[in-house]
C-alpha cells in the first residue's frame, strides 16, 4: 500500500477527533468534519475543494447512492443541508421536526434519505420527488443507528432497546426488543440451502458491544444471539462479506470470521490476533476482495480468498491510536482516522492504466505518477509526475501522452528524463489515445482525431497536420476502436468497417467490410496483421493485403484484449486474455492448408493483473498495486529455467517449438532426445509449414530415403497448390491433397493419387471430369478390388464397364472378360460364365472358374473346365466327387496324383474289378493294398511275397505271414513275422509248432538280448545244450553259456570253439580257469583260450608247459598258431616273447 496524503488535525479543524465519509460510487471526494461546525470537502489527492458551515455540531452526514449529494445534519436545528458535488452548491431542507436530529442515512438502492431524532421520530425524504414522510413515535427514545437494505427496507435501533424494520413509506414491518442498547445495524443474507425470496433477509445488530444479534425477517420468532469468548474483549466493528460470512474485530486485537449457515453457526472459521493491544475498526472491499483492520498504531490488509495471506501493512509511528477505516467503493483508496484527528489515505488499488510501444511500457504507479520502463532493454525506469489523475495513457517511440476528460498532455521522452512539450484540448471526452513517431490518434465520442504531436516539427507537412474521422458524409458511422502504426491509422466502426489510412499519402488505402460491428482491434507493429473482435464476441485475424480473415479458435467470449509478439523471430505469435487465462496463438501466412490461426495453449492469469506487453514468450503484467511483473507463458515451457530436463519436459518443449515454428530450436531438442519419433514429429511440422529444405534435412538425418527423394522431386515446383497437394499427400491428408490438386495446374495428380490409394469411387468421379478415357481402366481396377472384397455384383458391373472395342486393349479386355466370367458364375449365371471361360485361351481363367464352380458343388462343369485347362488331377478329383469313374478312367494316363489313383483303385475294388484295382493301387504306390488284393482276391502269393521282399513293407509282411499261417506253412509264416518285426508272435508260433530252430536261424543278428534269452531258455528246457549255450552267449549270459557248452557231447568241436569265444567275450578269470581245467590235455584248445584272451606271451609259455608234460609232436602246430595270432611279434617290445618262441622251436 502506498501513502497518498494525510489530512492533519489542524486542517480538519480539531485536535480531539475526526469523522469522514467517502463519496459513493466515484470516490472523488471525502467529507471531513470535527468539532468546529465546518464540513470540509477534499478531493482524492488531498486538495481542499469546498467548506460548508453548519449551525451546530455535525451529528450525521452521508452521500447518496450515486455520490452526487452530501446530506448533513447538526444538533442545533431541524434543517438538513444538501451539498451538490457537481455544482458545489448547498441547499436546505426543513424536516419540520422540532427536536434535535440524531441520525441520517441514504438508501442503498433508492433516492430515500432517513432522518431520526433524539425523541425517536423519523422522517423519510424522497430526494427525487422532494416528498417528506414524517413518522412520529417510530421509537420512544433517541434513534442511534440504522441501515437500508437493497429492497429499500429500513432497520433502526434506538436507546429504547427496540429494533424496527420499516418500508420506504415508513410502515413498520417487524419490531423486536433487545436486552441492551443496539449499535452498528447491518442488512445481509444468512447463508442457507435455499435463497431468500426477499434478498437481504437478516438484520444484524451489536447488543451492548458484547453479542451479535441476528434477526431473520423470514423467522422473526427465532432470533439468534451469538456470544464470544471474554478474552476477545468488546466487539469493535464487524462486516458481512461473501456468502453469509461475518468478519468481526474485537477490542483486544482479535480478528475472527464466522459463518451464518445453520450447520456452521457458532463456529470460528478463522481467528488471528491482528493487533497486540487493541483493534478499533475493520473494513471490507468487495471490489478488491480485500479486508483491513486497524489497531494499536498499524493498519493490516488481508486477502479474502486466503485470510492468512497478508496483503499489506502500515505502521504509524507518530500516532497515539487508530479510530476508523473506510474504503472507496472501487477499492482504490483506503482512509484511516486516528485518535489525534488525522486522516491517512492509502492507495490500495490503482486504475489499470497502461500503454506499450514495442518493448517499452508506461503504467500508472500512483494517482499522479506514471513510470516509463523497458524491461527487455533493462533501461532505468523514468518517473513522470502528472498534474491531474489521468484516465488515459498513450506511448509512442519518442513521446508519451496522458490526460483526462477532453484534455491531454504530451511529453518528449529523452534518454534520462521526460519533458512536457504540449497540451491540447479536444471537442469531446477522450477515451483512448495512440501515438506513433509523429502523430497522435485520439478517440473521442465515436470519432478519431489524427493530428501531429508537434505541428512545428519540420517533418510534418503543412497540409498533414490534422484530420477527423469519419468524414462528414458518413453521419451514422461511429468509430468504436482505433490504433496507429508507423505508417497507418487503423480504425473499426459500428458498421463493420476496418479502414486503413496511409499517413504518408494522407489518404485511405483499404476499407474492409465485416458482417457485424467491430468492437476492438489489435494490429501488429507493422499493421500487416490485425486481430479484431466483433460485436458477437467472435475473434478474427485480418490480412489487409488480400482482405482475408481467419477465425481465432477457442476464443473466450469475455476476451479483454490481445497482444502481438514483439520478438522478431516470433512475429506471427499473439495472445488473447480475459480475467482468468491467456491463450496463445500462431498466425501462419503459409501452410499446407493455406493461411491459418492455430491455438497453441493456455496460461493461467494471476488474479487482478492485466497483460500489457509480450516479448519472447514473457508477458509483462500490470498489477493493481502499481507494479509490473513478468509471466512466462506455459506454451513457452523452455523459458522456465528451473525445470528439470526430463524426457517429458523435453517432449513438451519440442511440441511447443514445432507449434511456434521455432524449427531450429526444435532441432536441438531432437538431438538431445535422440529418438526417431521426435525427428518425425519435427519433420511433419516443417512439412505442414512448407519448410521443405528444413524437412529434407530432418529426414536425411534419420535416413528416410523415400521421403528425401520425394521431397527433392517436388521442391522446385512453382505451383503452390500443386506443391501443397503433394505435401498433404505425404502427410496423409488425402482429402486436402485432392482439393489442392484440383485447384492447381495439374488436376490429374488428384486422379493419380486416388488410383494409387485404391480409392476407386473417388477416382471414378474424378475421371469423369478429368480423364474420361481412363474410366475403363479404373473400372477394371475397381472391379478387381471389389472382387477381392466379395462385392461380386458391383464387380461384375465394373468389369462390364471396363470392356472396350479398341484392339490395342486386348490384354485389358481379356482381364475384363475373365472377370465377367468369374463374376457371372458367382452371381449364379453359370452357363454364361462357364461358356466364356471355355472359349477363352487362358488356362488360369479356366482353373479359377473351375475352382469357383467346385466351391458351388457344380461338379460336372468344374471338372470339364479343369480338364479343358489341362489340370487333369483336379479334374479327376472332381469327377470322383461326382462318381463319374468312367471319366476318371479316361484321365488316368494323365494323372500323377497317388491319391487319385488310390481313390480310383478303391472304387474298382468295390466294383470287384480286382486286377484293375491292383494296377491302380500300384500306380498309387499303395503296396499294402496291392499285397492284400493279390493275397485275398487274385490268389497270387508269389507276387505278394515279391512285393514284400522288394518294398520291405511291414504291414505287407504281416499279411503274408497270416496267409502262410493259414496254409500251415509255419516256417514261411515265421520268416514274414520276423520281417514285420513281430518277434513275439514269431517266437510263440515257433514254440507252438516246434519250429524254434527255424526261428533261431531266421532271427539272425537283428534280435534283442531278450529274444536270444527266450530262445536259449526254450532249448534249455529241451536239453539242447549246444543251442541253449549258443543263444545264452548271444544274449550276453556267459556263465550259463559256458555251463551248457561244457555239457555238450556230440558237438564237441563246435561247443569247444563257442566256449573259447565265450571266454574271450567274458574276459572272466574264473571262466577261463574252468575251461582250461576242462581242456587239460588238449593243447590246441588251451592255447586258443589264452589267445582268445589276448594273453599272447602266456599262450607261448602254456604251449611249452603242455608240450613238456605231454611230449606230443603237435608242438610245432601250436607254435605256428601262437606266432600266427600275435600281432607285432617282430617288434622290439616283444623280444622276450620271441625268445620263448625260439625255445619252443628248439624243443621241437
Image: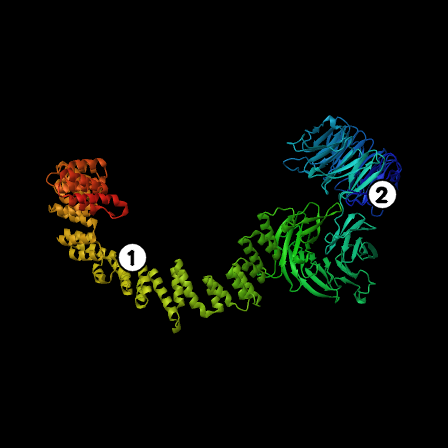
- Of 117 and 3, nearer the camera is 3
* Relative to 999, 708 lies left or right: right
How crowded pointer 2 is (Cα within 10 Å; few <14, some 14-19, many 20+) is rated as many
Taking 402 as reference, is 462 above or below it? Answer: below
* Relative to 511, 748 lies left or right: left
| Mark 2, secondary structure of its residue | strand
Identify the residue at horizontal 63%, vertical 60% (top origin).
549
Q: Kindly indicate the quadrant of the structure image that contains residue 232.
A: top right
The residue under label 2 is 41
- Of 1113 and 870, nearer the camera is 1113
> Quadrant of the image for the N terminus?
top right
How is the rendered protein coloured?
rainbow
> Quadrant of the image for the C terminus?
top left
- Residue 402 lies, in percent from the top left, at 79, 53
- Of 477 and 1094, nearer the camera is 1094
Taking 1108 as reference, is 636 above or below it? Answer: below
| Mark 1, secondary structure of its residue | loop
The residue under label 1 is 857
What numbered label is drawn on residue 1143? none
Q: CA distance from mark 1 to mark 2?
A: 112 Å
**Residue farthest along the bottom direction in this orientation:** 807
- Residue 930 lies, in percent from the top left, at 18, 54
- Residue 288 lies, in percent from the top left, at 73, 42
Q: Determine if residue 679 is in view.
A: yes
Q: Earlier in the sequence, mark 1 or mark 2?
A: 2
Identify the residue at horizontal 49%, vertical 64% (top origin).
753
- Residue 1003 lies, in percent from the top left, at 18, 45
Amino acid at each position: 500500500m502506498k501513502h497518498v496524503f494525510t489530512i492533519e488535525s489542524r486542517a480538519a479543524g480539531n485536535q480531539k477527533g475526526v469523522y469522514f465519509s467517502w463519496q459513493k460510487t466515484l470516490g472523488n471526494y471525502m467529507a471531513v468534519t470535527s468539532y468546529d461546525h465546518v464540513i470540509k470537502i477534499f478531493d482524492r489527492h488531498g486538495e481542499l475543494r469546498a467548506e460548508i458551515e453548519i449551525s451546530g455540531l455535525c451529528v450525521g452526514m452521508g452521500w447518496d447512492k450515486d455520490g452526487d449529494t452530501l446530506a448533513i445534519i447538526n444538533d442545533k436545528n431541524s434543517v438538513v443541508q444538501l451539498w451538490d458535488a457537481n455544482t458545489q452548491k448547498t441547499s436546505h431542507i426543513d424536516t419540520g421536526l422540532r427536536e434535535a436530529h440524531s441520525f441520517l442515512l441514504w438508501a442503498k438502492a433508492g433516492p430515500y434519505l432517513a432522518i431520526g431524532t433524539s425523541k425517536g421520530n423519523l422522517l423519510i425524504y424522497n430526494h427525487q420527488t422532494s416528498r417528506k414522510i414524517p413518522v412520529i413515535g417510530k421509537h420512544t427514545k433517541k434513534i442511534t443507528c440504522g441501515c437500508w437494505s437493497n429492497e429499500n427496507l429500513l432497520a433502526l435501533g434506538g436507546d429504547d432497546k427496540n429494533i424496527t424494520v420499516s418500508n420506504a413509506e415508513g410502515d413498520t414491518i417487524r419490531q423486536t426488543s433487545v436486552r441492551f442498547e443496539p449499535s452498528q445495524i447491518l442488512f445481509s443474507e444468512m447463508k442457507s440451502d435455499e435463497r431468500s425470496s426477499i434478498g437481504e433477509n437478516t438484520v444484524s445488530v451489536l447488543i451492548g458491544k458484547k453479542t451479535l444479534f441476528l434477526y431473520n425477517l423470514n423467522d422473526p420468532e427465532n432470533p439468534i444471539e451469538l456470544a464470544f469468548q471474554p478474552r476477545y474483549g468488546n466487539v469493535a466493528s464487524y462486516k458481512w462479506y461473501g456468502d453469509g460470512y461475518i468478519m468481526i474485530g474485537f477490542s483486544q486485537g482479535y480478528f475472527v470470521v464466522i459463518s451464518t449457515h445453520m450447520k456452521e453457526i457458532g463456529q470460528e472459521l478463522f481467528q488471528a490476533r491482528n493487533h497486540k493491544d487493541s483493534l478499533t475498526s475493520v473494513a471490507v472491499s468487495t471490489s478488491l476482495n480485500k479486508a483491513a483492520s486497524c489497531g494499536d498504531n498499524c493498519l493490516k490488509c488481508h486477502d479474502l480468498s486466503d485470510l492468512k495471506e497478508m496483503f499489506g501493512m502500515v505502521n504509524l509511528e507518530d500516532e497515539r491510536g487508530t479510530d476508523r477505516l473506510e474504503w472507496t467503493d472501487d477499492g482504490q483508496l483506503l482512509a484511516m482516522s486516528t485518535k489525534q484527528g488525522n486522516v491517512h489515505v492509502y492507495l490500495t488499488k490503482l486504475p489499470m492504466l497502461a500503454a506499450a510501444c514495442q518493448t517499452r511500457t508506461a503504467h500508472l504507479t500512483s494517482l499522479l505518477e506514471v513510470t516509463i520502463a523497458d524491461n527487455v532493454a533493462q533501461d532505468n525506469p523514468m518517473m513522470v509526475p502528472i498534474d491531474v489523475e489521468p484516465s488515459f495513457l498513450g506511448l509512442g517511440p519518442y513521446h508519451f501522452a496522458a490526460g483526462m476528460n477532453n484534455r491531454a498532455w504530451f511529453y518528449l521522452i529523452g534518454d534520462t528524463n521526460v519533458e512536457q512539450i504540449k497540451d491540447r484540448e479536444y471537442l469531446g471526452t477522450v477515451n483512448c489515445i495512440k501515438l506513433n513517431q509523429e502523430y497522435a490518434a485520439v478517440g473521442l465520442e465515436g470519432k478519431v482525431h489524427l493530428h501531429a504531436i508537434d505541428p512545428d516539427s519540420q517533418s510534418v507537412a503543412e497540409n498533414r497536420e490534422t484530420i477527423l474521422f469519419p468524414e462528414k458524409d458518413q453521419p451514422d458511422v461511429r468509430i468504436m476502436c482505433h490504433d496507429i502504426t508507423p505508417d497507418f491509422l487503423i480504425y473499426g466502426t459500428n458498421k463493420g468497417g476496418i479502414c486503413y489510412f496511409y499517413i504518408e499519402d494522407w489518404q485511405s488505402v483499404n476499407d474492409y467490410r465485416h458482417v457485424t460491428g467491430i468492437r476492438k482491434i489489435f494490429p501488429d507493429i507493422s499493421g500487416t496483421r490485425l486481430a479484431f473482435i466483433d460485436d458477437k464476441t467472435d475473434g478474427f485475424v485480418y490480412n489487409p493485403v488480400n482482405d482475408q480473415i481467419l477465425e481465432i479458435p477457442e476464443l473466450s467470449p469475455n476476451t479483454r484484449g490481445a497482444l502481438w509478439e514483439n520478438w522478431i523471430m516470433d512475429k506471427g505469435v499473439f495472445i488473447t486474455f480475459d480475467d482468468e487465462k491467456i491463450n496463445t496463438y500462431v498466425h501462419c501466412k503459409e501452410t499446407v492448408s493455406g493461411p491459418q490461426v492455430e491455438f497453441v495453449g493456455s496460461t493461467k492469469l494471476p488474479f487482478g493483473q492485466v497483460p500489457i506487453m509480450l516479448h519472447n514468450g514473457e508477458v509483462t503484467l500490470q498489477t493493481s498495486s502499481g507494479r509490473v511483473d513478468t509471466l512466462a507463458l506455459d506454451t513457452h515451457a523452455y523459458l522456465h529455467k528451473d525445470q528439470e530436463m526430463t524426457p517429458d519436459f523435453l517432449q513438451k518443449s519440442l511440441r511447443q517449438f514445432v507449434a511456434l515454428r521455432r524449427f531450429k530450436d526444435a532441432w536441438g531438442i531432437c538431438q538431445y532426445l535422440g529418438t526417431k519419433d521426435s525427428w518425425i514429429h519435427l519433420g511433419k511440422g516443417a512439412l505442414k509449414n512448407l519448410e521443405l529444405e528444413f524437412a529434407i534435412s530432418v529426414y536425411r538425418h534419420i535416413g528416410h530415403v523415400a521421403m528425401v527423394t520425394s521431397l527433392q522431386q517436388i521442391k522446385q515446383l512453382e505451383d503452390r497448390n500443386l506443391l501443397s497437394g503433394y505435401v498433404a499427400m505425404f502427410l496423409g491428408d488425402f482429402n486436402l491433397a485432392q482439393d489442392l490438386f484440383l485447384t492447381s495446374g495439374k488436376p490429374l495428380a488428384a486422379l493419380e493419387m486416388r488410383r494409387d490409394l485404391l480409392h476407386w469411387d473417388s477416382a471414378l468421379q474424378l475421371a469423369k471430369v478429368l480423364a474420361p478415357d481412363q474410366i475403363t481402366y479404373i473400372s477394371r481396377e475397381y472391379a478387381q478390388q471389389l472382387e477381392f472384397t466379395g462385392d461380386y455384383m458391383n464387380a461384375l458391373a465394373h468389369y462390364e464397364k471396363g470392356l472396350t472395342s479398341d484392339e490395342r486393349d486386348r490384354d485389358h479386355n481379356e482381364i475384363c472378360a475373365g472377370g465377367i466370367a468369374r463374376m457371372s458364375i458367382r452371381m449364379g449365371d453359370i452357363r454364361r460364365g462357364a461358356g466364356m471361360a471355355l472359349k477363352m485361351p487362358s488356362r488360369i481363367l479356366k482353373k479359377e472358374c473351375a475352382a469357383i464352380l467346385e466351391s458351388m458343388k457344380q461338379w460336372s462343369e468344374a471338372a470339364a473346365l479343369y480338364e479343358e485347362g489341362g489340370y487333369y488331377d483336379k479334374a479327376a478329383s472332381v469327377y470322383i466327387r461326382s462318381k463319374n469313374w468312367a471319366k476318371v478312367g479316361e484321365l488316368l494316363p494323365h494323372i500323377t496324383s497317388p491319391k487319385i489313383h488310390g481313390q480310383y483303385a478303391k472304387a474298382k475294388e468295390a466294383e470287384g474289378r480286382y486286377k484293375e484295382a491292383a494296377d491302380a493301387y500300384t500306380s498309387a504306390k499303395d503296396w499294402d493294398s496291392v499285397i492284400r488284393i493279390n493275397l485275398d482276391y487274385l490268389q497270387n502269393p508269389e507276387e505278394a511275397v515279391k512285393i514284400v521282399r522288394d518294398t520291405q513293407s511291414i504291414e505287407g509282411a504281416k499279411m503274408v505271414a497270416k496267409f502262410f499261417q493259414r496254409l500251415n506253412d509255419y516256417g514261411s509264416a515265421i520268416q514274414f513275422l520276423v520281417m514285420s518285426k513281430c518277434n513275439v508272435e514269431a517266437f510263440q508260433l515257433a514254440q507252438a509248432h516246434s519250429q524254434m530252430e527255424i526261428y533261431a536261424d531266421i532271427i539272425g543278428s537283428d534280435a534283442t538280448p531278450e529274444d536270444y534269452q527266450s530262445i536259449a531258455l526254450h532249448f534249455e528246457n529241451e536239453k539242447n545244450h549246444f543251442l541253449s549255450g549258443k543263444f545264452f552267449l548271444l544274449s550276453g549270459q556267459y556263465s550259463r553259456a559256458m555251463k551248457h557248452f561244457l555239457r555238450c557231447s556230440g558237438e564237441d568241436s563246435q561247443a569247444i570253439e563257442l566256449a573259447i569265444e565265450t571266454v574271450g567275450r567274458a574276459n572272466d578269470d574264473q571262466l577261463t580257469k574252468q575251461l582250461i581245467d576242462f581242456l587239460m590235455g588238449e593243447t590246441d584248445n588251451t592255447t586258443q583260450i589264452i589267445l582268445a584272451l589276448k594273453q599272447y606271451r602266456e599262450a607261448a609259455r602254456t604251449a611249452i608247459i603242455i608240450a613238456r608234460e605231454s611230449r606230443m609232436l603237435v608242438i610245432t602246430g601250436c607254435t605256428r598258431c601262437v606266432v600266427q595270432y600275435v600281432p607285432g611279434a617282430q617288434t622290439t617290445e616283444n623280444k622276450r616273447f620271441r625268445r620263448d618262441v625260439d625255445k619252443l622251436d628248439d624243443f621241437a
